[in-house]
Image (cartoon, grey):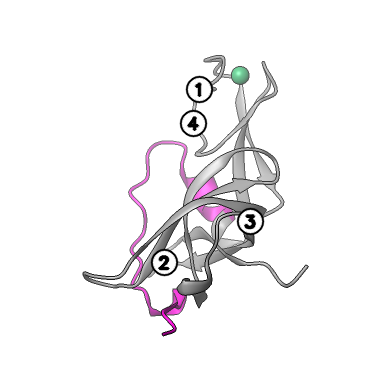
Amino acid sequence: MMTEQRSGAWKLGDPALNPGDEEYFIAARNGSLLVGACRACGELHHYPRCMCPFCWSAEVELKPAAGAGTIYTFSVTRKGPDTPYCIAYVQLDEGPIMMTNIVDTDLDLVRVGQRVRLVCVPTDGDYAIPMFTPAQAE
Ligand SMILES: [Zn+2]
């Protein structure tokens, strides 16, 4: 049985923004994914924060990620409202692992280690949410 999740089937509200979050979600609306980058230690992180989670420096900035990664782990929810859906941790090619959704695919075929690419799903409001879908055959 095919259990497909289509990003277009969701009613996505705007995220509740903390100070400094707007740039991230505006970038998503424009189709790109930003990660936090520390000017003190050079580490990248996701989700972006106002302080580096590695060295606690406040010298952080946002940098675009390529939008490609690999599924580190995932879970498919099949019962409840708006199901089925797939929550996953995706390791970006740049290194950080982010919690996200896998969309626009047969969820029965999602696998650990699968290559995925970014798809920014528009909210009903002003932003978009970065999610992932399986990459084309490599
Ligand atoms: Zn740092």
Q: Which residue is mark 3?
A: 32
Instruction: Estimate how packed mark 4 is, as few (under 14), some (14 to 19) or many (20 or more) residues with alpha carbons within 10 Å.
Output: some
Secondary structure of the residue carrying numbered label 4: loop
Q: Which mark is residue 51?
A: 1
Looking at numbered disc 1 in the image, what kind of residue is underneath it?
Answer: Met
Q: Which residue is mark 2?
A: 123
Instruction: Estimate how packed mark 2 is, as few (under 14), some (14 to 19) or many (20 or more) residues with alpha carbons within 10 Å.
Output: some
Mark 1 touches mark 2? (CB < 8 Å): no
Q: Which residue is mark 4?
A: 49
Secondary structure of the residue carrying numbered label 1: loop
Report the magenta residues as a range. 1-27
Please say if 97 is above or below 54. Answer: below
- Choose between 92 and 110: the one closer to the eye: 110
- Choose between 3 and 133: the one closer to the eye: 3
Looking at numbered disc 4 in the image, what kind of residue is underneath it?
Answer: Arg
Q: CA distance from mark 1 to mark 2?
A: 27 Å
Mark 1 touches mark 3? (CB < 8 Å): no
Residue 22 belongs to the span the image colors magenta:
yes
